[in-house]
Image (cartoon, helix red, strand yellow):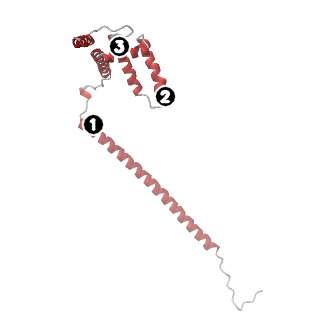
Amino acid sequence: MRFYLILFFCVSGFLFGCNSKTSVPDGIIEEPQMAALLTDIHLVDGSLYNLPPVPDTLAKHGLGLYLAVFKLHHTDTTQFKASMKFYTTRPDLMTRIYYTVTKTLDSLQAAKTKAVKPVVAPKASQKTTQQITDSVNNAQEKEKRKADSIKIAQFKLTAKKNMEIISKTDSLKKAKKKKKHHHKVKPIQTKPDAVPN
């Protein structure tokens, strides 16, 4: 008899534990509000992911954002922790909550993607890939020709300057030779039998 009594209480405890009770105890955040709160928390998590990895960045920015989310949903960290503890013991409720969270985040992502739709030019002004490639090649060829003409002009200018320097150098050498030639004094040749007066 004792065995049956223990078995009865175990089975009734098991059935009571598996009860699909949807009401939440007092002090626990209700399912819809919890789904909205978790959605906002995951959005804050995503925004913090983009912050630079500088020490204390999460402490400076993250804490304020999380507290703002809790204030927005009229709750605090204590109630949130108690609610998370409760919902983790009830996977059926947590699954429903995260189904809502996922659906909301997906719709936000779809709206963001739709808002950033690329602008497409009208078909009349669209160019084919070959036309674009040809125009790029033509532009590169023009730039190459321009660069070549600049190099040729620089070469001609340098050659002209070098020729001027060479001609000046040559003219200076000739002038020096003339000076040396004019300054040479011819010795006066005297006849040996000539007597000075």
Of discs 3 and 2, which sits in the foreground? 3
Give the mark, 1 or 2, whose residue is nearer the N terminus: 2
Q: What's under tag 3, amino acid-wise?
A: Met
Q: From the image, tell me which residue sits under label 2.
A: 56
Indicate the position of residue 66 as horizontal and vertical percent values. Answer: 43, 19
Residue that label 1 marks: 132
Above or below, 136 relative to 190: above
Residue position marked by numbered label 3 in the rendering: 34
Q: Residues within 10 Å of mark 1 (few under 14, many from 20)?
A: few
Q: Give me the residue at 59% from left, 68% from top.
A: 176
In the rendered image, the residue lying farthest to the front is 1
Circle 1 sits in a helix, a strand or a loop, which is it?
helix
Give the residue displayed 36% in from the left and 21% down from the top: 42
Q: Secondary structure at mark 2?
A: loop
Q: Is residue 187 above or below residue 143?
A: below
Q: Camera-side residue: 152 or 111?
A: 111
